[in-house]
Image (cartoon, helix red, strand yellow):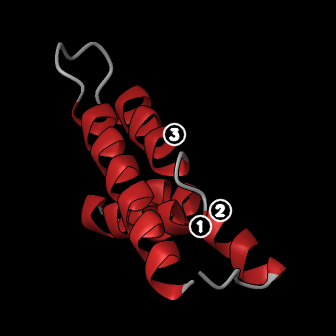
Amino acid sequence: MMIPPKRLRTFFAVFPFVSLFFFPWPMTLIAAFAAGLVFPPLALVIGVLVDIFYHPGVGWLVGTVSGAVLTCVAYGVRYVAKTRLL
């Protein structure tokens, strides 16, 4: 898997946090998945932040669960990409 340039990796790391506050949930989900391809645990962090900021006190953690699923999918995509390209 090709490693993106440093500026692009920084963009992928920062954009999901910005989209958390300025864009609707589907855009944040797409941004978290794109960032998860570069930094897989970042999707889980975004999911936890969604629960903290938007769903405090709710019994079931939608953001955390979706972040965990996105993290697992991102690890799977990275694994398949690495084994297919090398």
Question: Tag 3's secondary structure?
Answer: helix
Q: CA distance from mark 1 to mark 3?
A: 14 Å
Q: Is residue 17 left or right of residue 59?
A: right
Up the image or down, 68 lies above or below 29; here it is above
The quarter of the picture where the N terminus appears is bottom right
Q: Which mark is residue 13?
A: 2
Q: Dividing the image into 4 quarters, which one contains the C terminus?
A: bottom right
CA neighbours of label 2 inside 10 A, class few (<14), some (14 to 19), many (20+): many
The percent position of residue 46, horizontal first and vertical second, equals 47, 45
Q: Inspect the image, locate mark 3, and give the three-letter code of the amino acid beneath it.
A: Val
User: Label 1: which residue?
Assistant: 38
Residue 26: image x %, image y %? Answer: 25, 65
Residue 44 occupies quadrant: top left
In the displayed structure image, the side of residue 39 where residue 79 appears, left or right: left
Of residues 38 and 16, which is closer to you in this image? 38
Q: Pick whichever, 56 or 14, lies toward us.
A: 14
Sequence order check, earlier mark of 2 and 3:
2
Name the front one of labels 2 and 1: 1
**Mark before the other along the chain sequence, 2 or 1:** 2
Q: Is residue 31 visible?
A: no
How many numbered badges does the structure rendering display?
Answer: 3
Q: Amino acid at mark 1?
A: Val
Q: Secondary structure at mark 2?
A: helix
| Inter-mark Cα distance, 2 to 1 | 8 Å
Q: Residues within 10 Å of mark 3 (few under 14, many from 20)?
A: some
Residue count near mark 1 (Cα–Cα under 10 Å), binned few <14, some 14–19, many ≥20: some
Q: Is residue 39 visible?
A: yes
User: Do residues under tags 2 and 1 come within 8 Å of each other at their CB atoms?
Assistant: yes
Distance between the alpha carbons at the discs numbered 2 and 3: 11 Å
Q: On residue 45, which mark appears?
A: 3
Query: What residue do we see at 33% from left, 33% from top?
Result: 64
- Residue type at mark 2 is Ala
